[in-house]
Amino acid sequence: MAELRIDLVCVVPQLFGEFLSTSIVGRAQEKGLVEIVVHNLHEYASDRFRHIDDTPYGGGGGMIIQCEPVFSCIEQLQGERSYDDVIYLCPDGEQLHQGICTQLSTQRNLIFLAGHYKGIDQRIRDLLVTREISIGDYVLTGGEIAAAVLTDAVVRLIPGAVGDASSVLDDSFMHGLLDAPHYTKPQVFRGHAVPDVLLSGDHQRITAWRTEQSLEKTRTRRPDLLE
Ligand code: ADE
């Protein structure tokens, strides 16, 4: 059995496109580290036109996803296994950061619920959802892309998902700092040379240089991380 199972419950599954079968997320599934299952809410609609949304009570623009299909889908899943969290992706959720991803990567079963249109009926949030996450202060057309972002950020942290584990440990945010600059061949490109220290073979000096670069970049770009 996979380390982690993620059920993606959404309105427009096509938006996941090649994402689920490509790169680290694709390989992590092939390696059996994660099982990802997509559920189309239209398949849980009770009417023959597969409607899953309606106009908001009290008026206003946009369509709201109804309780029925979401409860039907998620309660069916919950009847099959117990879930650590039912996470709703929404712009008014808790803002995503690396610490949340690390914590989620240690769980066994997660549901990511992606809304679309104006939003979902509040009773879904009150009664089914256990956690609400935003990927940033901007509004997307739907939660699918946010769910893909969360899936990617979580899956790459499962041990074995990224071939070289030390590469993940060095990532930006893993130590509360932004990542240091990286260079590869050629040594000189259009007159711009790789910093000498990286060619020195002195690992202590290289680590010290990277830490200093990380700190400097964090100080200038994200001073809030140092507070
Ligand atoms: N759905 C729409 N906008 C979103 C955001 N910024 N984060 C998560 N889900 C969303």
Image (cartoon, rainbow, N blue to C red):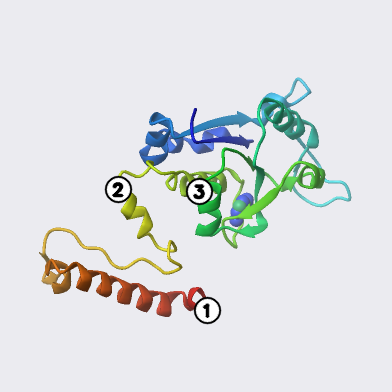
Residue 9: quarter of image: top right
Residue at the image position 70 percent from the left and 32 percent from the top: 74
Mark sitting earlier along the chain (2/1): 2
Q: Which mark is residue 202?
A: none
On the picture, is 103 further left or further right than 75? left
Residue 113 rendering spot, x and y as whole percentages: 65, 41
160 in relation to 134, above or below: above
Residue 101 coordinates in the image, percent (x, y) = 52, 52
Q: Which mark is residue 164?
A: 2
Labels 1, 3: front one: 1
Which of the two discs, 2 and 3, sits closer to the camera? Answer: 2
Q: Gap between marks 1 and 3, in whole Å?
A: 26 Å
**Neighbours of disc 1 within 10 Å: few (<14), some (14-19), many (20+):** few
Query: In terms of secondary structure, where does tag 2 sit?
Result: loop
- At label 3, which amino acid type do we have? Val
Pointer 1 residue: 227
Q: Which residue is mark 3?
A: 149
